[in-house]
Amino acid sequence: MALSLKPVPGLPQSTDRDTADTVQVMLARLKEGREEAALDYAQRLDGWEGSPVVNPDQIARAIRAIPDGLKRDIQWAHDNIRRFAEAQRGTLSEMEIELRPGLWAGQRVIPLRSCGAYVPGGRYAHIASALMTITTAKVAGVENITAVSPPKPGTGIHPAILYAMHLAGADRILAMGGVQGVAAMAYGLFGAPPADILVGPGNAFVAEAKRQLFGPVGIDMFAGPTDSLVIADHTADPLTVAWDLAGQAEHGANSPVWLVTDDEALAREVLRLVPDCAASLPSPNREAAIAAWENLGEVILCENREEMAREADRIAPEHLHVQATDLDWWKSRLTAYGSLFLGAESTVAFGDKAAGPNHVLPTSGAASYTGGLSVHKFLKVVTWQRVTEASAGAELARVTAAISREEGMEGHARTADIRLDALRPRLVAVNGT
C-alpha cells in the first residue's frame, strides 16, 4: 500500500461562490453594455484608457523592441508547435462508406469559423500560451482568430506576447484582460466576430467566465490550477527531481506537486532538497513555490513500479514526468495524464514552452477522462448520409418504422412510411412485384 511521507494539509475554504457571482454580474453587464461596459472595466480593473484594438504600428513597434535572439527563440518554438499541430491534423480525415448497397454514409471535417484565444499577462509574460493556442487554431483552418491579453497601464501588451500573437497568426488582437477580455471575444466586441470557441488559460475569473459562457460558446476545458507529478526510482537524481517539483510549484500556492517513488532514500532526500530549491528562487516566485510545497506538496512511497503506476493513474495529473528505468514500459502502462514526459533528459518546462505538443492540458484529475488542447478541438467532425438505391431505402424505412413504433414514436414511424410508399413503384419496376 502506498504511504504518504508528507500529508497534504489542504487549502483554505474556497471562495468559488464569490467568484461565480462576480463573474455573472460582469457578464450580464458586458452583454448589455457591450463596448462601453468593456472599456469601463478595462479602465477600472486594468488601468487601461486607450483603444483596446492593437493596430499594425503597435505590432511593428513591439517587434522592433524585441532582441533578435529572443525573436529567433520564439520562432523556433513556434515551428515545433506548428509542425506538431500539422501532424495531428493529418491523423483526422474525411471518409465515406457504403454500409449496404445503395446506403451511403460519411464524415466531413470542418474548421470552426472563429476562435477567441486568451493569453495571460499578469505576473508572468506567457509567450508560450500565445503560441500554443493561436498556432493550433491556425493550423486547423479557423477563419478568424481573435486574441486578447491584459495590458499594463501606459505600455499595453508585453512586446514578446504581442510578437508571439502576430507570429502565430492572430487576425485581431485586443489589449484587454479578465472577464471583459473573454466577453469581448464571446460577444463579438470591437469588430471581432463572436467566437465559436474560447481557449487559453487564465486566472479564476477568466476560468469562471468561460465556464458560464459554455454552451452557446465552446471552450477548451474547465481548467483549474496547474499540477505536476514525478515518478522516480533509484536511478533518479534527487536534485533534478527536487528542481522539477519546485520549478512547477512556482506557478502558485494552489498548484499541487507530487513525487511517487519506490525508493525511500530518494524520497527523503527530495523532501530535504525541495525547500532549499524553492527558497533560492527570486521573489515572488519563491513565496509561491514555498506555499505550494508546504500546502500541497506530497511524496508517496510505493512498494513497486506497478503500485507507482496505479498511484499516478489515480491522481491523473496534468503533467506526468517519469524518471525511471524501462521507459517503454511506463509509456505503455500509464493511462491518465495530460502530457507525458519520459526520461530525466526531458522536463515539464520543455513542454510548457517549446517542445511542440500543446501545453493547455486537463487539471484537477480531469486527465482521467480527457486529453489536452489539440488541433482537433478546432475541427467539427460531422456526418452525412444518402440513399441511392430503392431496395436500401425500403429496408431502411421498414426497420426505422418498426423500431419507432416499438419506442412509441409514431411520428417518426410515419416519416419512414411515407418514403416506403414513395419507393414502391420503383421496387415494382425493378422486381416485377
Image: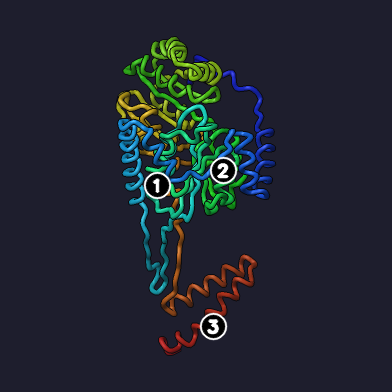
Looking at this view, is 38 or 13 the one in front?
38
Secondary structure under badge 3?
Answer: helix
Looking at this view, is 356 or 389 the one in front?
356
Residue 74 seen in the figure:
yes
Q: Position of residue 354 (x, y in %)?
A: 35, 34
Residue, disc 1? 169
Q: Which disc, if any, is residue 424?
A: none
The residue located at (54%, 17%) in the rendering is 291
Going from N to C along the chain, the mark reached first, 2 or 3, is 2
Image quadrant where residue 267 sits: top left
Q: Amino acid at mark 3?
A: Asp
Q: Quadrant of the C terminus?
A: bottom left
Asked if labels 3 and 2 touch by Cβ distance under 8 angstroms, the answer is no
Secondary structure under badge 1?
Answer: loop
Residue, disc 2? 182
The type of colouring in the image is: rainbow
In space, the residues marked 1 and 2 are separated at their CA atoms by: 19 Å
In space, the residues marked 2 and 3 are separated at their CA atoms by: 53 Å
Q: Amino acid at mark 1?
A: Gly
Instruction: Please tell me whether residue 293 is drawn above or below residue 386 in the rendered image.
Output: above
Residue, disc 3? 421
Instruction: Please tell me whether residue 51 is drawn above or below residue 195 in the rendered image.
Output: above
Q: Nearer the viewer, mark 3 or mark 1?
A: 1
